[in-house]
């Protein structure tokens, strides 16, 4: 367990010096109190949750494709979810999430315990840079499970703006019982730019062969490859791809498209990570002290500015000494650490860093300019 302390000694000036205003560093990610005002069952294991924030709170000013976090009483850490509606379609002071109820999941069990409408929550956001590009290329969307949320928001926004682009939306599910938002997809098709097409293609991987399903079968990324890439129904030189959903689906889909010749800069994705995923690590040798990661952190102690810490291969990082302006070491001797015990794996800091200094692939023991041992 990581321990964090603000001082290793009794400071006689503790009651004289003002503490820094933490709200200044939180200006880009905002936290809003609200209540759950509606819960709708979308499938047997997926719900739509509508949160209404307090009447006079400012809007999040989110963009389609971004995400936020949801914090409820009784659960230690917030959870990250994509906003499930284009912001232009949300009612004032409301945000909508699609939440898949996972067996044994802490928040899933919280929702299953009793009716949760009128429960107080805290929503933080917006985060992430997933969103549509500004080209005229065909939009190819691939989603699975509750990855419907961010992609639905993207195509709703495109429809609302009447973008002059074709769009293919491939959605992977297990069975017909796992399909949802079919009426919304039909509405988007009817409202799409009149000179272009929107096509929604659900692909089922586990539907029984003795049922009435006449649509595509198999894994959604394999179907994309065999029916659209290999047959050249898609011009690989004039598409932009957008993935949202499970990491395995995204990894395979990205490989399929790159093998076909699509450059990495034409592919955008939003992976659904959870506490089982590796926490990002900051390489302080690349850090320029721009504070972009601090401006998007959803909770106070997930990223810590330190003047010293201890570590070992057996116990990891321990005894973190936080920087306190005017009391501990100066700015250029500090180190930014991601606290593994507090990190919710939202990866907002990874997206925000302009110098690629933050990644789950970095060495577990942070690389620093100057290491001060306690």
Image: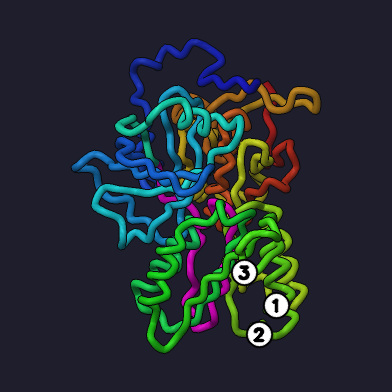
Of 7 and 167, which appears nearest the observer?
Answer: 167
Q: Which residue is mark 2?
A: 233
Quadrant holding the N terminus: top right
> Are the residues tagged 2 and 1 within 8 Å (C-beta)?
yes
Foreground mark, 2 or 3, reads 3
The span picked out in magenta is 124-148
Vertical comparison of 5 with 365: above or below: above
C-alpha distance separating marks 2 and 3: 21 Å
Picture residue at 45% right of the left edge, 85% below the top: 196
Above or below, 68 relative to 167: above
Mark 2 residue element: loop
Above or below: residue 123 compared with residue 173: above
Q: Looking at the picture, how far across and down is residue 97, in whole percent?
A: 42, 47
Q: Is residue 156 left or right of residue 3?
A: left
Q: Please give the residue where the numbered disc 3 appears in the rendered image.
A: 214
> Does residue 214 appear left or right of residue 261 in this picture?
left
């Amino acid at each position: 367990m990581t321990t964090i302390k603000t001082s290793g000694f009794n400071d006689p000036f503790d009651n004289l010096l003002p503490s820094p205003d933490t709200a200044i560093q939180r200006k880009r990610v905002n936290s809003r109190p609200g209540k759950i005002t509606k819960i709708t069952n979308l499938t047997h294991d997926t719900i739509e949750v509508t949160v209404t924030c307090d009447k006079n709170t400012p809007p999040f000013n989110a963009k389609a494709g971004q995400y936020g976090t949801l914090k409820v009483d009784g659960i230690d850490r917030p959870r990250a979810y994509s906003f499930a509606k284009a912001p232009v379609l949300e009612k004032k002071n409301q945000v909508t999430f699609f939440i898949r109820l996972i067996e044994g999941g802490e928040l899933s069990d919280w929702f299953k315990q009793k009716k949760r409408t009128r429960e107080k929550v805290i929503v933080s956001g917006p985060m992430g840079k997933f969103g549509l590009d500004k080209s005229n290329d065909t939009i190819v969307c691939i989603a699975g499970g509750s990855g419907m949320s961010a992609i639905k928001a993207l195509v709703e926004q495109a429809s609302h703006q009447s973008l002059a682009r074709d769009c293919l939306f491939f959605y992977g599910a297990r069975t017909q019982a796992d399909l949802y938002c079919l009426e919304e997809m039909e509405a988007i098709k009817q409202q799409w730019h009149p000179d272009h097409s929107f096509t929604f293609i659900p692909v089922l991987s586990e539907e029984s062969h003795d049922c009435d399903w006449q649509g595509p079968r198999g894994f959604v990324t394999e179907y994309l490859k065999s029916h659209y890439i290999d047959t050249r129904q898609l011009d690989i030189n004039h598409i932009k791809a957008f993935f949202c959903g499970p990491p395995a689906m995204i990894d395979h889909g990205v490989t399929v498209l790159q093998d076909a010749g699509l450059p990495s800069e034409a592919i955008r994705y939003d992976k659904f990570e959870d506490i089982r995923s590796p926490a990002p690590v900051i390489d302080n040798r690349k850090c320029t002290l721009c504070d972009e990661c601090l401006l998007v952190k959803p909770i106070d102690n997930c990223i810590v500015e330190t003047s010293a810490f201890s570590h070992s291969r057996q116990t990891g990082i321990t005894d973190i000494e936080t920087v306190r302006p005017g009391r501990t070491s100066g700015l250029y001797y500090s180190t930014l650490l991601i606290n593994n015990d507090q990190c919710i794996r939202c990866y907002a800091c990874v997206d925000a860093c302009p110098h690629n200094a933050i990644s789950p692939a970095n060495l577990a023991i942070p690389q620093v300019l100057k290491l001060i041992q306690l």
